[in-house]
Every structure is written in C-alpha cells, then in structure tokens.
Image (tube, rainbow, N blue to C red):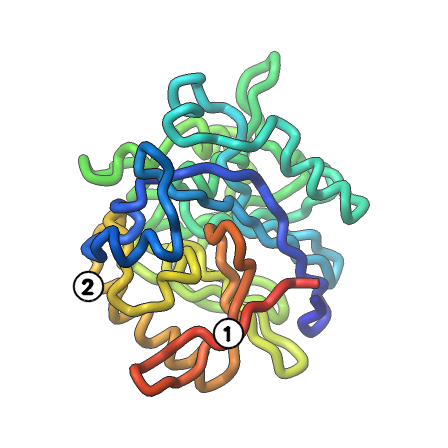
Amino acid sequence: MQIGSYEIHAIEAGRFALDGGAMFGVVPRPLWERSNPPDERNRIAMAARALLVVGNGKKILVDVGNGAKFSTKLAEIYKIGNGPGALDHELSRFGLSSSDITDVVLTHLHFDHAGGSTIATEKGLRPAFPRARYYVQRDHWKAAQHPTERDRASFFLDDFVPLEREGVLEFLDGEGELFPGISLRLFHGHTRALQCPVIRGDGKTLLFCADLIPMASHVQLPWIMGYDLRPLETLEEKRVVLQSAADEEWILFLEHDPVVEGLTVRHGAKGIERAAEVRLE
C-alpha cells in the first residue's frame, strides 16, 4: 500500500496466544468466543504483526513482536509460534535484512511488542537492528522501569535495557511529527504513554492501533482488555479515535488480530461499527 511518499507493508513477526478472558475483560466468554474461539486452556490465537514503512530514505519498523528469547516454560505458556529468524525472513520478502532498518518505533515495551528489539549473541544481548535508532516515550520508559504489581509480568528487561546501554535509544516527549508524514498520538489507558503512529498522505490516513484496539473484536467500545491499567480511560480514548476514523475513513491497522490486518469503520444504527477489511497490498 502507498500512503504519501511511503510504502506500507504488514510484517508477521510471529504468533502466540493469551487468555481469552484477559483479552476481553468484562465481556462474557459466550460473546467473545464467537469471534475468537479459545483452545483447551482458554487461550486465543494472536498475531504479533509489525508495520514496515519505507520511504524518504527511511526503512522503519513499528513494533517488533515477541522475539526469540523465551525460556521453554514461557514459550509453552504463551504458545510462541515464531522462530529466531522470523522478522528477518519477513523482511527478506521485500529484499531487506535487519541491518537495513533505520528506525524502530516501539509503541510500548510490553514483551509482545518490544521482545524482538534485542537478540542473544555470544557476546550477550545486542540490538536486533544494528543500524537503527529506537524510539520510546520517556514517560513510558520510566513506567517500565518501575511497573506495578499488576503489569510487572508484561515487561522483560532484556527486551529494552540493552538498548539504552548500547546508546541507540531516542526518548520522545509527547505527541507530534516524528518523520515527514508520520506523527504520534499518545494514549494512557492501556499503559502509560502508549504511542501510536499516524501515517497520512494522498488523502489517506492509517493509525497503528497497537493495544488501543488490538483486534477487530475490540472495535466495540466496551470490549477492553483486562490488561489495561485504566480501562475507563481506554473507553474514552477509543470513543474519540473511532469517531475520527468513521468521519475521515481512516485505516485502522490491527497488531494482534490473527486474520484481519486492518479495517475501516462507519457510523451505524447502534454506533460505530466495522465497515470493510483492508489488506496492505
């Protein structure tokens, strides 16, 4: 897909699974299992879908999936389905390798978004994209250093602390344009200072939803993850975003839906509803 001066591609960084009840919060299982059937351990299928953005001399990744540093126990718990070369394999489809990536925008530092930021080598943990700058909101970085008991299990220090040690981190302070045609919006319901890129050009707008709207099912306003620290804030953030997306025909890029890469929404009789699926071809 072309948006302005950028080529936009969906990148499959791997598959995993999380508890369905946790993914849908107060929504009862008889409702969510219709669209997201669970396995025998109540886990639902999840994608770790990144975004590749190429243009203006940049080769940008937005989020990088789970990575390949899991212990055998955790890999089994989360049903990790990607191998150590998953991202490189995907990049090779576009004639690229990890050394070609110039910039990595991390929406936040939970393991399913930032795990692929570092790799284990004989010399220890190193940035997975050796020539890239990594972008993180300063407020979120501080929160990740001192997580609460509720979200501590979502942060793995090996995913991001080596980035600071290697001097490849760029700390950002708030919303605004990051690159020409690419700006950032901040949300605070899921976690502190979640940054979602917005790409605009030629009359098109794409929002990388990250965990604000992780799956197609979450377009429904009350369908909010149990993982969110401030679910009522998420509710209002979704309301504002979905209103704009329906009014202006945005493409909503979905990071975790196992089937749907993106979609548009519209105003319906009962509020905002799904309109059409979008593939970034």
Near-viewer residue (157 or 268): 268
Provide the residue designation for mark 1: 264
Q: Which residue is drawn at 61% across and 12% down?
A: 122
The amino acid on which the numbered mark 2 sits, given as a three-letter code, is: Leu
Q: Which of marks 1 and 2 is in front?
A: 1
Other-residue count near label 1 (Cα within 10 Å), few / some / many at <14 / 14–19 / ≥20: many
Q: What element carries label 2?
A: helix
Q: Is residue 54 left or right of residue 157?
A: right
Q: Can residue 94 be seen in this view?
A: yes
Residue 7, x across and y down, in percent: 72, 63
Q: Name the residue under label 2.
A: 232
Horizontal relation, residue 188 to residue 37: left or right: left
Mark 1 belongs to which amino acid? Thr
Measured as percent of width and height from the top left, residue 220 is found at: 32, 68
What's the residue at 68%, 39% (across, down)? 131
Q: Residue at x 49, y 77 (%)?
A: 275
Assign the C terminus to one quadrant of the image.
bottom right
**Residue 77's image quarter?**
top left
